[in-house]
Amino acid sequence: MDQNRNKLKTAVTNLTHIPSGSIKGIPHFTFSVGAFSLSFSRKLHNHFSIFFYFHEAPTMAAFTTKFSLPSFLEQVKKLTDSQKDLIKRTGFGNLLLIPNQVIRRSHLIKLMEKWSCEKQAFIFPPGELKITLLDVSLILGLRVIGQPVVLKEDAPLTSLEQELGASALNRTISVKLLKATLESMGERDDEFFMQVFLLYCFGTLLFPRANGKVDSRYLHLLQDVDSLSSFAWGDVVLEDLHNSLSQRKSKKTSNIGGCIILLQIWCYEHIIIGRPNLLDQPSTFPRACRWDGNARNSSIPQLDINFEELEPTQILWKLEPTSEEMEIDIIKEIPQEWHLRTGPGTIEQPIEILGESAIRMVRVHREVVEEEEEPTRQEKSTIFVLSDDEESKVIGDLKKEILELKTIIEERKEEGAKKRVEDEDEVKELKKKVQVEKELRKRVEDEIGELRKRLEHEEELRKKVQAEKELRKRVEDEIGELRKRLECEDELKKNVQVEKELRKRVEEEIGELKKKVERKEELKKEVQVEKELRKRVEDEIGELRKRLECEDELKKNVQVEKELRKRVEDEIGELRKKVERGEELRKEVQVEKELRKRVEDENGELRKRVECKEEAWKRIEVENERLCNENRLMEKCITDLGELFATNNSVDL
């Protein structure tokens, strides 16, 4: 192989480029290696071009992605049965069945190298292959026939979007915030849970983005649970994957969006080598569930696929639904003619190859062109595959043809020189015409350039006008919000004024309460004096009891007891007066309680400020209760004394 390639390079080195100049009909050719091409002047009646493809394309760098199947499956494991039933009603229930799959990055990098942005297909040596809508429906179990998914630019900002962190200027929601919201919901199975879960599914599985965010406008489509299943979500997933592959290939970016698992399973389904084993399970729908994705399969050598050496027999050009899959509604509704549809285009049929020892492709392209005045004939293309021996033979034939072409070129040169001498006047006139034509062409190009500038300027103006309209609309929305805020501020000012007046009234009432508290402090002192007096009375009563134990002593002390009785009666009278004062104080306390309740009803916020005062009231009430108890004890003591005196009188009698 290397020897034949060296011979080809030697043949190329011996060739030279002969410019055609201004001589009409003189052929010229170019020769280059990498892909090796040979072409001749368009003015020749018959010429051909040859292309050799050596399959030495530069490799692409490793990629990064926000696609995370494990993160999605982690949330799926936490779902309850009722939550899963709710997701199944939306048409995304098949995604819950997908098992974990190891993303084979080296495998996908090589596959991405074969992507063609122009054809929206993967270009392999035997032919080109596209991802069809049927593939998407079979692999992910998503609907591809239904209402189109459209995100409106002028969609109004909803309160749910604002709650999840979106704004009028930034219509995106963080995937991290969605994850935190899901974890805080627990077993909640309402519409809000459904919307947050599907947005998280979009951000991690179906439409991942490099910034880790999701377009909040999807919420306008997620409002009705029962209508969600009528949208063609599979079509949008395929379009997003196409855009991501094209963006990576054209802009040479390291990050790639789109549903990576769709691309990997699609490769397993269509490329029959280097793929993992099938799982032994009864259900195989969606087809992402039937591949063993957990095993690393490092021991399987064919996993390292060389897509440059693929043969037609190693490619499954079209997926055929099984009888079980044809019973599923989303598969049954796909028309037969749609089985090859990829959205805007259709799949290309494989190239027919004759022979089994195909090593390189040679594309012979013969183009037939008449003079400039005559119409161009249709181009014909033929594709062959050559073995090593045939390749050497072709190179030898090419060398012979090149020598013959050199001879033809020399002859044409001589004829052209003779004709040039004969037609010098004609050449001068032609030069003048060419000069005039060049000037005219230059003027036309200048005018076209000006028109293009004007069109670009008009396009910029149109964009500016559109931007101004959007800005004006946003400003009007913000002004409306500000007006609402101003109205709220006016109401707040009124409330503040009312609160100030109420606070003033409360402060006055608190002042009165302080005065009453001072009065109660004086009452406490009087109670203390009464306690001391009661203690003295108890001591005296104890002494009297001791004296009454002996009748003789009682007789002697009757007079003293009478005096004591009189004195006690006087003290009891005083105590009764004090009790009456306590009753009046209790009534005042009751009035104060009602006043305090009214103050609490008028302003709940002031309760905290007067809690300390309430504690003082409670202490006063406790003291009052204690005073009442003491009064009862005094009355009991007086009763006992009365009985004692009655006993003494009876003894005297």
Image (cartoon, grey):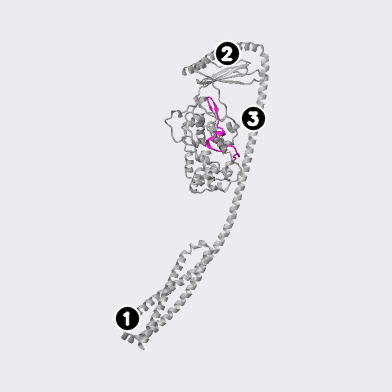
Nearer to the camera, 537 or 221: 221
Is residue 57 shown above or below 47?
below
Q: Circle 2 sits on which residue?
A: 405
- Mark 3 vs mark 1: in front: 1
Secondary structure under the numbered disc 3 in the rendered image? helix
- Mark 3 vs mark 2: in front: 2
Question: What segment carries the magenta color?
Answer: 123-150
Image location (x, y in percent) of residue 469: 63, 43
Callout 3, which amino acid?
Gly
Which label's residue is closer to the chain start, 3 or 1?
3
* Disc number for residue 414: none
Give the position of the C terminus as an image quadrant: bottom left
**Label 1 packing within 10 angstroms: few (<14), some (14-19), many (20+):** few
CB contact under 8 Å: marks 1 and 2 = no
Image location (x, y in percent) of residue 194: 54, 45
* Disc number for residue 449: 3
Nearer to the camera, 606 or 331: 331
Secondary structure under the numbered disc 1 in the rendered image? helix
Callout 1, which amino acid?
Lys
Res 56 seen here = no
**Could you tell me which residue is drawn at 44 percent across and 77 percent down?**
578
Q: Is residue 147 magenta?
A: yes
**Could you tell me which residue is drawn at 32 percent across and 82 percent down?**
549
* Disc number for residue 546: 1
